[in-house]
Image (spheres, rainbow, N blue to C red):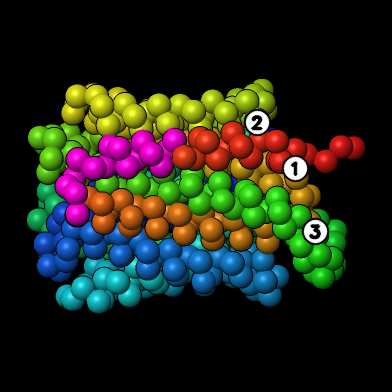
Amino acid sequence: MRARAQPVLLPLGIFVVLGLPAGSLGVAWPHMRTSFGAPLAGLGLLLTLATLGFLLSTAWTGALSDRLGLPTLIAVMSAIAALGLLLLAVATQWWMALLAALMIGMGSGPSDAALNAFVAIHHGVRLLGWLHASWALGAALGPQVIVGAEAVFGSWRPAYLVMAAAFFVAAALAIWRRAEFRAGGLPAAVAAGEQEPTHRRVGDHAGVVALLASLFFLYVGVETASGQWPYSELTTARGVSGAAAGLGVSLYWSALAGGRIALGVFGNRIGVRGLLDLSVGTAAVGAVGFWLAPPLVSTLVALPLIGLALAPIFPLFTVVTKELIGAGATTRAIGYQTAVGIAGGALVPAGIGLLLQSLGPLTLGPALSATAGGFAAAHLLSRRFLRPPRA
């Protein structure tokens, strides 16, 4: 058992590190905005540029992994993300923060997609649950790193130095412990270098990949908007204290982590399709609750409910991808789908940010409800097309 468990520890640790910047930005933003004199909607611009970097690198995950190997890919990309975090920590002008966001996204994307594919191919839904729980744990820790830096140093900047150090450690461990990534083995065709058939298999399933990518777009948009904008809305428009709002955001990410831990424990006992239906529907209910409930209930109940509901969706979509198109095409397909998903993670929050700036912070509730409801409707419409091939 010990030998079997050992190879999965490093991917879990790297996903904790990948989650740190994602969870911290929404809490850091009010302080960061003051430092740079940026507009309220500037958070959306940061997310958009991070997404652009993520897209530019993630779409090439399969090719980069083939050329560099998984350990070297993770090491190089983690170092790029670390340099972006260092730049953000020392930035004195707004354009420097925008460049840093681009670098952070570019460095994070391939590691995310390649590790998702590695675990989906070799370990299955339970470990995918633990992998994404690790990311959510990092995202839950991110706000506390920001709050701690503000309390001790009176600035958000030292928090990003800590995150940069964590990414450098991840890069070093990926090289030092590179044998752990070979422990699961590779599909025979991939190990033999037969890449052209893989390309054809992805092309043969282009419709399925595109449909899943559209669902990834909406899902990541809901997840990111729910984690980044509530702190600003709750503190500026609904009378919630910074401490309570920060707690609510941490509870959101913690619920995301907790739900994925549950998937890691019980994932082999639950039907994938039924759990997807339940999760997507509950997320829409939680979004409406955040909009209509009293402020503290929105903060401490509805927001964590959204996180809990969203928790299994990304891992389950990854499993569905492997079911539908096979292991040989999974790495490239997940790279494409993750790239489109992260586009949703920028464009949806950016669009909501423009609404908040134009119509006021209280626009968040209806905007989040409409987005979650649209995701639920798209998921229901897609169910008839996303069926595994018959044996």
The type of residue carrying mark 3 is Asp
Quarter of the image with the N terminus in it: top right
Mark 3 surroundings: few (<14), some (14-19) or many (≥20) residues within 10 A: few
Q: In which quarter of the image is the C terminus?
A: top right
Mark closest to the chain's N terminus, 3 or 2: 3
Q: Which amino acid does label 2 sit on?
A: Val
Task: Measure the alpha-carbon separation of dots 3 and 2.
Answer: 24 Å
Q: Is the magenta stretch mostly helix, strand or loop?
A: helix
Question: Residue at the spot x=16%, y=54% of the render?
Answer: 30
Q: What element carries label 1?
A: helix
Q: Residue at x 56, y 46 (%)?
A: 215
Residue 389 in percent (x, y) is at 83, 41
Q: Give the range drawn in magenta.
A: 357-373
Residue highlighted by disc 2:
272
Q: In which quarter of the image is residue 186?
A: bottom right
Q: Name the residue under label 3.
A: 204
Residue 70, position as x, y percentages in the image: 63, 64
